[in-house]
Amino acid sequence: MALKASIDWDKCEGNGVCARVAPEIFSVDEQGNSDVLMEEVPENLRAKAMLAMRGCPTNAVIITEM
């Protein structure tokens, strides 16, 4: 089952944990703005996506089953 990655912009503080854990899926620019690079997460990146979600200090990373 595929996963969908998204960010809750109201909670995101640009800590960059998601981009460090899963740079294939998330990025953070110099201003601290996070972005989703890959909305549909392939199975081979499932573990990284889940780690990024669990590691986010503000719970802004959302990973859902599609």
Image: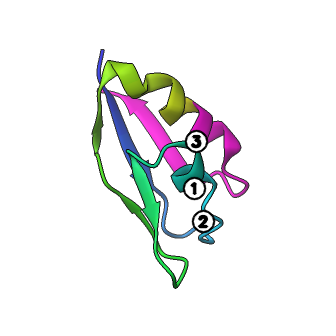
* First of labels 3, 1 by sequence position: 3
Disc 3: which residue: 52
Disc 2: which residue: 11
Give the amino acid at mark 1: Ala
Q: Quadrant of the C terminus?
A: top left
CA distance separating discs 3 and 1: 10 Å
Q: Where is residue 43 in the image (x, y as percent from the top left)?
A: 34, 19
The tag on residue 60 is 1
The magenta segment: 51-66
Left or right side of 56 for 62: left
Give the amino acid at mark 2: Lys
* First of labels 1, 2 by sequence position: 2
What residue is drawn where x is 37% and y is 20%?
44
Left or right side of 27 for 60: right
For residue 50, above or below residue 34: above
Asked if residue 36 is among those painted magenta in the image, a careful observer would answer no
For residue 66, above or below residue 40: above
Characterize the local packing of mark 2: few (<14), some (14-19) or many (20 or more) Cα atoms within 10 angstroms: few
Q: Which of marks 2 and 3 is in front?
A: 3
